[in-house]
Amino acid sequence: MSPAGRRHPLIGIGAAVVAAAAGVAAGVVADRASRNRAAALALETDEGFSITPTRQLVVITDDGVPLHVEVDEPTPEAAAAAADGTTRRGRPDELPTVVLTHGYCLSLGCWVYQRRALAQAGYRVVSWDQRGHGRSGVADAESYVIDRLGADLHAVLDQVIPTGDLMLVGHSMGGMTILALGEQFPDLVRDRVVAVALVGTSPGGLDLANGGKVATMGRMLLEVLGPRLLRPLSERPELYSRLRRITRDLEDFLVEQHSFASPVPRSLVRYTADMLLGTPLPVVEGYLKTFDGFDKRPALSEFASSMVLVFNGCQDVLTPPAHRELIVGAMPGGEHVVVNDAGHLIMLEHPDLLNAHLVQLAAQATRARAERIDVSRAPRVRRVVTDVARERRMRRLTGSDGGREAGRGGDGKGASAKEEERRARGA
């Protein structure tokens, strides 16, 4: 399937309404059965998606919504090793706490790979479910707006991490939440946020899902027909559950096609589908309106003293290139990494690649704070990279090694680096 044929799952659901009306759903499922099956099977592991946090707690917002929060503490040995290389006195308490904020229709479960990697690297990690998502409480539909989410993030920081340096990581709507935090609490960002990673997100000012005609059609279907479809189903949850059981194969197809741009394990597709389509339908509907007119571009300037990573997939049509260019243009010192063969859920599709960049960002930001380096003067870096290690593993497991590998460089972080970086700088 070509990259142009992949769409975000919620856009895909809207497009599926048209497909079903045309009677082609059966053909769609048949296509899924034969697509990249060998590669997907080869990528299966016994790793699993469960993770046991060090502690779990509930943060109550100022409007009474309970937010589910999980904390992963590193081992003392891992924290000491990280501190030895990044702080002048080698003190683990000077390392930033990494805060992970998920996107629309996801949960903190989407960060499972990053939580493991960051804790193993010596960093304390705090993850939370946004209101209405995961194990957090639902709220009035009027509160499902980005500004409210920024205030929620502040509540998590205030009650769970009241002191110390922070590294904020947000995917999609989670990145928007971080920008809302910066707009509402600029002093906190200036004083405590040493690094920020914006993953597959948008600062606003452009329509989401404007990556092509099919994506635009899907967005319009959700905006126009979404309330009419979602509200009746939300009033009959038993019907919705029954429909999900019947259309399980179609669910997997839509999620695979619209979330990822390369083969992923079948177990990961199902794990992702349960997150995306397990979100309560009133919550799905309630958040739809928050993206209309969203614009936090002025808030980007509040992160001038933070080290910045902008991380995107080449085939992400929900937040296509124009969105990330707005972020990079307003953050001259940021590092911009664009990943080949990657869709919107890049943290699940290319976890090792993102993990390496996040660990590096945390270390660099810690060192910069310890040495009082002015990161706002850092040069802009833009790289287009390929997840070489993943490609090699997939070809080895499927027996498809060939001449392609000889033409690729790479450093394990995924770049055919120098050539790609020169090309990006000249773009």
Image (spheres, helix red, strand yellow):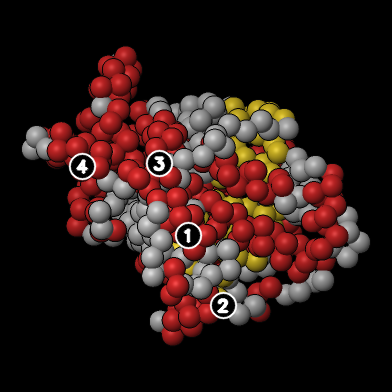
Tell me the amino acid under the disc marked 1: Arg
Residue 218: x and y in percent read 23, 47
Q: Nearer the viewer, mark 4 or mark 3?
A: 3
Residue hosting label 1 = 392
Mark 3 falls on what kind of element?
helix
> Does residue 208 show up?
no
The answer to whether residue 345 is left or right of residue 181 is left
Q: Is residue 98 above or below residue 224?
A: below
Query: For the view shown, which residue lies furthest in the top direction?
Result: 238
Residue hosting label 3 = 41
Q: Quadrant of residue 71?
A: top right
CA separation in Å, label 2 and label 1: 30 Å
Q: Nearer the viewer, mark 2 or mark 3?
A: 3
User: First in sequence: mark 2 or mark 4?
Assistant: 4
Q: Residue at x 48, y 27 (%)?
A: 138
Q: Which mark is residue 337?
A: none
Query: For the view shown, which residue lies furthest in the left direction?
Result: 22
Tell me the amino acid under the disc marked 3: Leu
Q: Are marks 1 and 3 in contact (CB under 8 Å)?
A: no
CA separation in Å, label 2 and label 3: 39 Å
Residue hosting label 4 = 31
Q: Quadrant of residue 29?
A: top left
The answer to whether residue 33 is left or right of residue 313 is left
Residue 283: x and y in percent read 40, 31
Tell me the amino acid under the disc marked 4: Asp
Residue hosting label 2 = 380
